[in-house]
Amino acid sequence: MRIKVSSLNEALKLIENRSVIAMTTSIIDDAPMGFLRYLIRNGRKNLSFIGVTGSGLNLDMLIGSGIVSEVDTCSISLGDFGPAPNFQRYIKSGQIKIKDNTCGVMYSMVQAGVMGVPFVPVRGLWGTDLLKNRQDIKMRKNPFNKGEDIIVASAINPDVAIFHGIKSDRFGNTITAPQRDDLMLAQASNKVVVTVEKIVQSVLNAPEPSKGNFIPGIYVDAVVELPGGAHPGGCYQSYDADVDHIKKYIESSKKPELFSSYLDYYIFGASNDSDYFKAVGLKNNLGDY
């Protein structure tokens, strides 16, 4: 088995300008925010983003930084904190292209990517504008029932899927938060980057079974140990969301000049996550807040 332990810089090399990146549903918690800060800091441009099946703080920050030009997702929200401010501004001004989707259809498109087939037949989109606005979803005749129209949706195979997990071993076997579709997205993607709170000796031989998702190392290309990598969101079994900083983020996101200052201070002004946490005003032990 190949050792997958990597630095942030080595993992970043898997993502080029115009790459298609993907993440699983994350309104606030368990998103790879530390890696995304590094991605923004190092100037990647014109990325396409796929959110399976929805998105939140992760996508809003990428949009506000100006590095995402196209979005394919079913919803974007900050949950109890309200709408996603950067997303709203960029959509209204036409600065990004949005490809609307539905949860069931997006699941099917990712499953097609897992199976290695070009498309899957789905139902439920008749009469919607999705067929007018998406070239990768089309209506066709059912070859087994000539009187029925069906929808065919193109497979999703992102260039790079990015996750933040609880722990991983050096071979890339990873535990992430439960009730997510991490394994399916990892299988459909060409490359997979995982940041984790801790790299352990063995995930497979842990004394107690984890209640989280398991991504086998065969699907993982790079693992980076990044404690606090989900901040300002929380991380399953590790720490809660930093409510005060999320509120500060939201206030800063309401106007372009305010968010530019936020980026300058918390991302471009911090050369690494240690500097970031000093700027936020937190100790290394995230549980202290």
Image: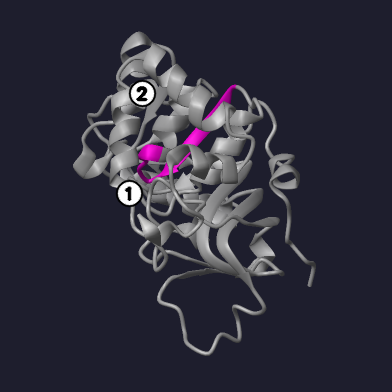
Q: Which mark is residue 86?
A: 2
Q: Does the magenta stretch include residue 108?
A: no
Residue shown at the point (40%, 76%) measured from the top left:
211
| 82 lies above or below 90 | below
Of circles 1 and 2, the one toward us is 2
Give the quadrant of the C terminus. bottom left
In this rendering, does residue 211 appear at all? yes
| Closer-to-camera residue (18/3) | 3
- Tell me if mark 2 has few (under 14), some (14-19) or many (20+) residues whose alpha carbon lies within 10 angstroms of its own: many
Residue 27 is situated, as x and y percent measured from the top left of the image, at 33, 45
Residue drawn 35% across the image and 27% down it? 131
List the residue tagged with mark 1.
104
Instruction: Check disc 2 and report its element: helix, strand or loop.
Output: helix
Q: Classify mark 1: helix, strand or loop.
A: helix
Viewer-nearest residue: 192 or 283: 283
**Magenta-colored span:** 46-57
Amino acid at dot 1:
Gly
